[in-house]
Image (tube, rainbow, N blue to C red):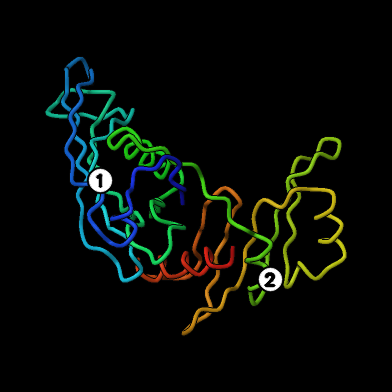
Amino acid sequence: MYDKQNDAYDEENETGGNNDIDTKHHETEKLVNGYNEVLETWIMKNEISPTGYQNFRIITDEVYSQRVRVKGEVVDEVIKQELHLAYVKVRNDFRNGVGNLITLCKKADSHRIKEIFEDQYELSFEPHQFDVLQIIEESADVRNAKFDVEIETVSGVTMKGTRVHNTEYYANMLRSGQLSAVIVNYDLPDKTITFRVTVDGSIQLYSNLGDYEILELIEDLLNLE
């Protein structure tokens, strides 16, 4: 998840009006296997979720280094069309959160999607800083806690178990290191889910959730801050 840094939304957008992020198509040329290939990027604007997030489908031509044979000729690069999903907060009763970008993909792909939005719409995003300590307070259980530390040759310490945040060792680590990520059991209205959340805006789900359920979870976490 990323927070919007520059003010690309006006007051009309805060109450559910049209926003500046619309469907776009972009082309670039790149030398691939000795040929000038046209690489396309499509950003397709779709429906708005009940919680006020606009859905976008991002289709990109990506070049990968891979030796393959095509029509009897060996080449070292291939072009693959990738599809990713993203949501942008466009409607809210309050200003907080409007403009946030949520990507439903792997972390490396998430950075790529962020860069596409920044380049195409002249926006700037920064990773959201989740309040991990408050998430711990509201969780049913804490199964894993990772600390960044500097102790001789050790740069990180991970605790595993059940309710690890209630142990004396956790309290000591909290004083001496920086808590960077936790795995928690978290109660939703109809189920308990497990996920990993980091201070740099990443969430890894260990439970099956639909897109709208993920957005509702993020809303819950934002409301804790």
State whether residue 214 is above or below residue 140. above
The number of numbered badges drawn on the structure is 2
Q: Position of residue 128 (x, y in %)?
A: 52, 50
In the figure, residue 5 lies in which quadrant? top left
Q: Quadrant of the C terminus?
A: bottom right
User: Residue at horizontal 25%, vertical 30%?
Assistant: 78
State whether residue 157 is above or below residue 169. above
How packed mark 2 is, by other alpha carbons closer than 10 Å (few <14, some 14-19, many 20 or more), is few
> Outermost residue, bottom direction?
190
Query: Which residue in the structure is indicated by mark 1?
Result: 20
How far separated are the C-alphas under marks 1 and 2?
A: 37 Å
Q: Position of residue 202 (x, y in %)?
A: 52, 52
Q: Amino acid under label 1? A: Asp
Q: Amino acid under label 2? A: Glu
In the figure, residue 123 lies in which quadrant? top left
SS class, disc 2: helix
SS class, disc 1: loop
Q: Position of residue 192 (x, y in %)?
A: 53, 79
Q: Position of residue 198 (x, y in %)?
A: 59, 53
User: Residue 137: which numbered mark, if any?
Assistant: 2
User: Residue at horizontal 38%, vertical 41%?
Assistant: 114
User: Residue at horizontal 19%, vertical 30%?
Assistant: 39
User: Residue at horizontal 16%, vertical 38%?
Assistant: 25
State whether residue 1 is above or below residue 171. above
State whether residue 162 is above or below residue 7. below
Q: In front here: 70 or 217?
A: 217
> Outermost residue, front direction?
11
